Image: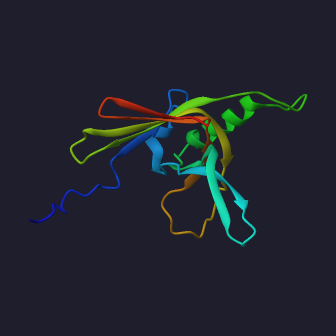
């Protein structure tokens, strides 16, 4: 009896974006599925090795996006406007500006495998864009980092919700 090893996931079958972000789904070249950490407490037992206890919370890693920057820098300014919406530069206050973000994974035939929804996502950072006239690169990439409150997975019409 042999295993079917030819059913491999192809790395290009995804789309990501948000109803609140117009350009991400067009220019996203890479995105990570966020890792999940359970925060297990431990007690020392006097013999030098810890006794692990049940976790008391769940922590999600951030999501990193790589976006192609279009010729008019529309993608770049879309995120700058998100930052501007979060900060009142007159009085120094910060507003709560969140959006839902999705990552939809499909197979090579375009059929849905599963969908990840990041609920109440927030812009964590916009990375550097190095302008270099001597570079041989033909495109510029904008690194963006998102954090979020909780995550919802949908697979085969079943929903799995993980909350902090």
Q: Residue lying furthest right in this view?
A: 91
Residue at x 61%, y 65% (from the top left corner) = 133
Q: Is residue 130 visible?
A: no
Q: Residue at x 25, y 41 (%)?
A: 110
Q: Is residue 101 left or right of residue 158?
A: right
- Name the residue furthest front: 46
Q: Measuring from the top left, give residue 107's x and y in whole percent.
A: 26, 46
Query: How was the colour assigned to the protein in this rendering?
Result: rainbow
Query: Up-down: is 6 above or below 53?
Result: below
| Of residues 74 and 152, the one drawn nearer to the viewer in this rendering | 152
Using the rendered view, name the quadrant where residue 48 is placed: bottom right
Q: Quadrant of residue 52 in the image?
A: bottom right
Task: Locate residue 40 relative to residue 6 in the image: left or right.
Answer: right
Residue closest to the eye, 108 or 57: 57
- The reply to whether residue 41 is in sight is yes
- Most extreme residue toward the bottom, as rendered? 48
Q: In the picture, which quadrant includes the N terminus?
A: bottom left
User: Which residue: 15% across, 63% down?
Assistant: 3
Q: Is residue 87 left or right of residue 92?
A: left
Would you place residue 2 above or below residue 148 in this image?
A: below
Question: Whole-percent x and y of residue 61?
Answer: 59, 50
Image coords of residue 45 (percent x, y): 72, 65
Compared across the picture, whether 89 is left or right of 127 comes to: right
Q: Position of residue 112 (x, y in %)?
A: 29, 38
For the point 29% across and 55% down, the residue is: 9
User: Which quarter of the figure is the C terminus placed in?
Assistant: top right
Q: How many marks?
A: 0
């Amino acid at each position: 009896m042999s295993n079917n090893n030819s059913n491999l996931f192809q790395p290009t079958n995804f789309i990501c974006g948000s109803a609140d972000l117009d350009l991400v789904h067009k220019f996203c070249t890479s995105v990570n599925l966020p890792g999940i950490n359970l925060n297990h407490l431990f007690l020392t037992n006097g013999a030098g090795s810890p006794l692990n206890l049940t976790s008391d919370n769940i922590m999600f890693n951030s999501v990193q996006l790589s976006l192609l920057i279009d010729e008019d820098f529309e993608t770049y300014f879309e995120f700058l406007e998100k930052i501007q919406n979060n900060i009142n530069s007159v009085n120094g206050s910060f507003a709560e500006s969140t959006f839902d973000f999705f990552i939809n994974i499909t197979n090579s035939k375009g059929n849905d495998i599963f969908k990840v929804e990041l609920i109440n996502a927030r812009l964590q950072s916009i990375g550097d864009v190095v302008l270099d006239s001597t570079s041989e690169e033909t495109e510029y990439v904008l690194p963006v980092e998102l954090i979020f409150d909780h995550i919802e997975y949908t697979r085969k019409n079943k929903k799995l919700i993980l909350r902090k």
